[in-house]
Image (cartoon, helix red, strand yellow):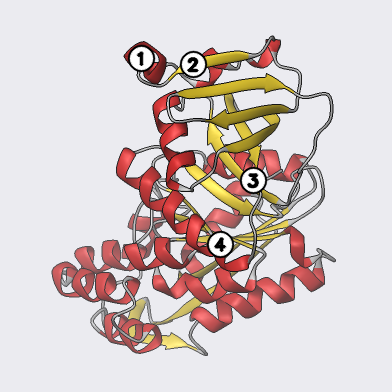
Amino acid sequence: MSASSFLLKNQQTLQKTLQQILPPSEVSLPVQIQLTENHLLIAEQEKAPGFTDIELVVFADLSVENLSTMLAKMSFTSCLLTDINHRVEKTSYRFSIQLSNEQAYVDLKTVISDYAQAQAFEAALLKQAPALDTPGLLLMDMDSTTIEIECIDEIAKLAGVGEQVSEVTELAMQGKLDFAESLRARVATLKDAPQSILAQVGDNLPLMPGLVTLVTELHAKQWKVAVASGGFTYFTEILKEQLNLDATQANVLEIIDGKLTGKVVGDITDAQVKADTLLALAEQFNIEHPQTVAMGDGANDLTMMAASHLGVAYKAKPIVRQKAQSSINYSGLDCLLHWLR
């Protein structure tokens, strides 16, 4: 591929995608991208100067307009295309970014996240992303992350207290209520409900798009995959069997004489327990910290994300997107495969 210049005032140019201006089959990496007031300049490099551990990752269908706008918002005049990955029928582009300090990374991560969210595309600014080809650990939340429902809300509907419980669940996920206290309050409303309602929910757990692909691909690369949930072991055990998960952590509903007692047995799996689970599993499976990933959607997942090397907010509440290291907002869970190096 020879050097190219794209006029940014031209509407046809702005609508082109990365795949159109940088066809994977024609690119010899690395490629320098330079932004001027009116042009996007592209030229292959003999060397790869300026490689850093900060990468901007986007997909092949990103438009020139969005790429140039992102660079402008980050006040960058140049970056380096260092890798193009083809994974699970998608293609992603990884750009090496030069940053002066840690605060610059934090600030720009927010800029990228906000712009991608506003324009409805996926993008991540990643620091020393874990490597897909090196064994690692992924710990995920269950409700509204690996499955499309909140199990306690579905149980509550069958028990006739659905609206009452779902309102509390939403407040807890937003971080507006203490999780353990809110869980006990919700479970208490289920007192005397028949045990059979658990099976009604568990027999048809709707898996989140991309979950099976993600777990399959990670296992093929010798990764460990686990679930830590503020929900219940009845459902995490179903997922463990379906997906061949390496471990699960969740709460135990007390059941006596075929009925729910409205109580949880033992300690609550709260935010700190989730984080402790990640660290314990990493030690158990001999996974180095830079190879740990945590993914969730609610405030109860933030401590777990912070304990991991890469925390990913998945179709998450605003407070979680704001505080997580990266996010996935529109794609299936298998998008994570592209955030990994």
Q: Which residue is mark 4?
A: 104
The residue carrying mark 1 is 10
- Label 3 vs 4, first from the N-terminus: 3
In front of the other: 132 or 265: 132
Residue 287 shown left or right of residue 323 in the figure:
right
Q: Measured from the top left, where is residue 282 in percent x and y?
A: 76, 68
| Above or below, 59 relative to 184 | above
- Which residue does the image show at 44% across and 45% down from the upper left? 208
Q: Residue flagged by tag 1: what amino acid is it?
A: Asn
Secondary structure of the residue carrying tag 2 is strand
Examine the image and state in which quarter residue 217 appears: top right
Kind of residue sitting beneath label 4 = Ala
* Quadrant housing the C terminus: top right
Q: Secondary structure at mark 1?
A: loop
Name the residue rendered at 20%, 64% in the picture. Answer: 157
Q: Residues within 10 Å of mark 1 (few under 14, many from 20)?
A: few
In the image, taking residue 207 as reference, residue 41 lies left or right, namely: right
Mark earlier in primary sequence (3, 2)? 2
**Distance Cα–Cα, label 3 vs label 4:** 11 Å
Q: Position of residue 314 (x, y in %)?
A: 45, 53
Q: Which residue is mark 2?
A: 6
User: Are circles 4 and 1 on residues that touch, CB within 8 Å?
Assistant: no
Residue carrying label 3: 97
Q: Earlier in the sequence, mark 4 or mark 1?
A: 1
Query: Residue shown at 56%/50% (left/top)?
Result: 125
Query: Counting other residues with Cα less than 10 Å from the Cα at mark 3, is it few (<14), some (14-19), or many (20 or more)?
Result: many
